[in-house]
Image (cartoon, grey):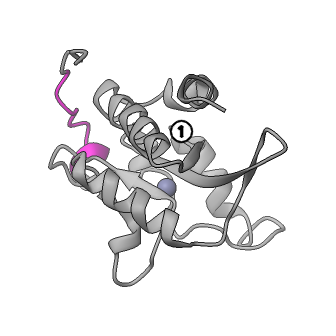
Amino acid sequence: MNAADLLKRAEKKLSGLHPVVAEKAQKLIKEAYLEEIYIIITQGLRTIEEQNRLYAQGRTKPGKIVTNARGGYSYHNFGLAFDFCVCDVVKGSLVPNWKVDRRWLRVGQIGKSLGLEWGGDWKSFKDYPHFQYTFGLSLAQLRSGRKPPIVSVTKR
Ligand SMILES: [Zn+2]
């Protein structure tokens, strides 16, 4: 397992994100890797239609409730949020470890050092896998069509 493998694996999920947010996710993967914490990206952009389908689950559709956000009420819907999972390496393969342990908390810290907002800090509903970067825009502003700035990404 090396950092390039982890980045490659994250590519597809990160492709729908705002470039600034995608870059922060890549840095997060690399910095966690240096501490032997292996993370995968489990969710990136979720379209408003996808969010509405998810919201219907457990309400008007079968299944259990998995979100309290309707379409347009999650930063995922605007490419400004992603979810991760810490993995164990078992016989060379990544196996997601969903139990929140000290590695998850460390990833939260690293993310915050990169300027991301971490769901693990939320008071009412702790969303440990979740990071977002809002550019100071509220969901209401984003729903009304405000766009985050286009920032060119410079490689360091
Ligand atoms: Zn999320």
Name the residue located 21 percent from the left edge and 15 percent from the top edge: 154
Does residue 27 lie above or below 151 as drawn? below
Element under label 1? Answer: loop
Q: Residue furthest bottom?
A: 124
Name the residue located 41 percent from the left edge and 62 percent from the top edge: 106
Residue 122 placement (x, y as % from top left): 34, 75
Q: Quadrant of the N terminus?
A: top right
Residue 141 seen in this snapshot: yes
Residue 58 placement (x, y as % from top left): 74, 72
87 horizontally vs 140: left or right? right
Q: Which region is colored magenta?
A: 141-150
Name the residue located 57 percent from the left edge and 50 percent from the top edge: 51
The amino acid marked with disc number 1 is Thr
Q: How many numbered marks are there?
A: 1
6 horizontally vs 27: left or right? right
Quick check: is 94 in the magenta stretch? no
Mark 1 closeness class: few <14, some 14–19, many ≥20 residues within 10 Å: some
- The residue identified by callout 1 is 47
Residue 25 placement (x, y as % from top left): 41, 38
Quarter holding residue 60: bottom right
Residue 128 seen in this snapshot: no
Of the pair 31 and 96, the residue shown nearer to us: 31
88 horizontally vs 49: left or right? right
Q: Quadrant of the C terminus?
A: top left
What secondary structure is the stretch in magenta mostly built from?
loop
Of the pair 131 and 8, the residue shown nearer to us: 8
Name the residue located 18 percent from the left edge and 48 percent from the top edge: 137
Residue 69 placement (x, y as % from top left): 49, 64
83 horizontally vs 17: left or right? right
